[in-house]
Amino acid sequence: MDKTKIKLFGEKFGEAFTACGVVMVQGDLSVLSLKHAMIAAETGLAAGIAVVVGSYWERINTKWGLIWLTGVATASVDIMVHPTHFGPEWAEAAVTGAGAGLLAWGVSRIRNV
C-alpha cells in the first residue's frame, strides 16, 4: 500500500471516529468515555478500510465519490457496531454517516485551498 492510501485511511478513520463519537454522546463530550472511544475507533477502522478499498475503483476515487463513500461506509458500519441511542434503529447511523460525510467535505475543502 502506498503513502497516499495510508494518508487516505488516516483521514477517513478520523472523520468516521469523530462523527461516531460526537453523535454517540449526542454532542455532550463531557460524557465521552473510553468505551465510547473504543466503539468510535471500531467504526473508524472499518469505515477507513472500506473507503481505502473503494478508492481502488476509478469511479469512486474522486472528490465527491470519496465524500459519498465516507458517509455511506460510516453509516453502514455504525449500524452494525452498536445499537442506536435515539430514534428508530437506523437514525443514529444515518446522522453519523451524514456527519462523517460533512467532515469529509470540509477536509476536502481545506486540502484544496
Image: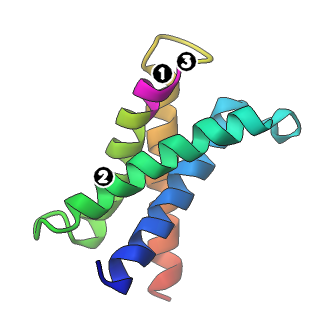
Residue 9's quadrant in the figure? bottom left
Write down the residue under mark 3: 84
Instruction: State the predominant SS element of the stretch in magenta.
Output: helix
Q: Nearer the viewer, mark 1 or mark 3?
A: 3
41 with respect to 55 (left or right) = right
Amino acid type of the residue that numbered disc 3 sits on in the rendered structure = Thr
Q: Count numbered badges in the picture.
A: 3
Residue 7's quadrant in the figure? bottom left
Amino acid type of the residue that numbered disc 2 sits on in the rendered structure = Ala
Please tell me which residue is depicted at 43% across the width and 52% down the height of the picture: 101
**Residue with the most extreme left position:** 58
31 with respect to 42 (left or right) = right
Nearest to N terminus: mark 3 or mark 2: 2
Please tell me which residue is depicted at 62% across the width and 17% down the height of the picture: 85
Spatial distance from mark 3 to mark 2, Cα to Cα? 21 Å
Q: Nearer the viewer, mark 2 or mark 1?
A: 2
Residue 8, horizontal then vertical, whole percent = 40, 72
Q: Are marks 1 and 3 in contact (CB under 8 Å)?
A: yes
Q: Which residues are magenta?
A: 78-82
The secondary structure type at the circle numbered 2 is: helix
Looking at the picture, tell me which residue is in the foreground, 110 or 78.
78
Write down the residue under mark 1: 91
Write down the residue under mark 2: 50
Spatial distance from mark 1 to mark 3, Cα to Cα? 7 Å
61 up-or-down from 100: above or below: below
The secondary structure type at the circle numbered 3 is: loop
59 up-or-down from 24: above or below: below
